[in-house]
Image (cartoon, helix red, strand yellow):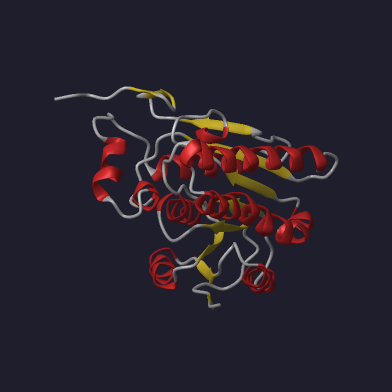
Amino acid sequence: MTVTSHQPETQRKRAVVTGASSGIGAATVRLLVASGWDVVALARREARLRALAQETGCTYVVADITADESVAQAVEAITAGGRVDALVNNAGGALGADRVDNADLEQWSRMYELNVLGTFRMTNALLPALRETAGSIVVVTSTAAHEPYEGGGGYVAAKFAERVAARTLRLELVGEPLRVIEIAPGMVHTEEFSLVRFAGDQGKADAVYDGVPNPLQAEDIAEAIRWSLSMPAHVNVDSLVVRPVAQAAYTKTHRVTS
């Protein structure tokens, strides 16, 4: 595990962003830093984190949220470096698009481990630090956490579980000055999400967005996260669903044909 800091500790608010090496995570790091936060970017790919730190001045921690020991070491380094006012659980992803009756259960297991157990491994480990600052827990789910679609059984199951666990945590923390916020993005065109889902098949990844006018960008979701965290401390954004105008539901998307 590597920890690198490019700025002195201050009393500014401090956020931890998981899945920060690309897409929504990297965009969130950029926007929070620009908005005056100290940010710890966390992911597995050190080269990308190093470049992000050089670009933004954030701190970074290399860690795997699916491994207990890695998370424990990361949290030790994070808390030694200062306060924690927000945890943005962004790390996650989809693998495959198989029908339920042809499911690759190993992929289902990997999605559950990453999207659900990884999120709450980080959350539980950082709860003591967040309690000290009356902090915020952001869980980036998906519209797949709210509605099923064909070919999405494993991902939908994982995201439903992530959302319901976050909702349960919200209930259990009532009476404590902690916020639990769900951000549920619809179609977001990032460089890796669909490419990873389809095992590097660029054609299949591109087809997801073909003809869709103005799908969301990572920066749009980063702004939703920033806005939710900027609300007064007594305001909890329980659940915020964000879609492009062209997408009314996961299975109802306008596409322009040539």
Q: Is residue 168 left or right of residue 200?
A: right
Q: Nearer the viewer, residue 16 or 203?
A: 203
Q: Nearer the viewer, residue 184 or 155?
A: 155
> What residue do we see at 71% from left, 60% from top?
126
Q: Is residue 182 above or below residue 63?
A: above
Q: Is residue 102 above or below residue 195?
A: above
Q: Nearer the viewer, residue 132 or 20?
A: 20
Q: Quadrant of residue 236?
A: top right
Q: Nearer the viewer, residue 251 or 220?
A: 251
- Residue positioned most to the front: 101
Q: Is residue 216 left or right of residue 101?
A: left
Q: Is residue 234 left or right of residue 100?
A: right
> What residue do we see at 66% from left, 72% from top?
69
- Quarter placement of the C terminus: top left
- Quarter placement of the N terminus: bottom right
> What residue do we see at 47% from left, 45% from top?
222
x then y, percent, for residue 220 = 42, 39
- Residue positioned most to the right: 175
x then y, percent, for residue 106 = 53, 54
x then y, percent, for residue 237 = 64, 34
Q: Is residue 105 above or below residue 125?
A: above
Q: How many marks?
A: 0
> What residue do we see at 51% from left, 39% from top?
224
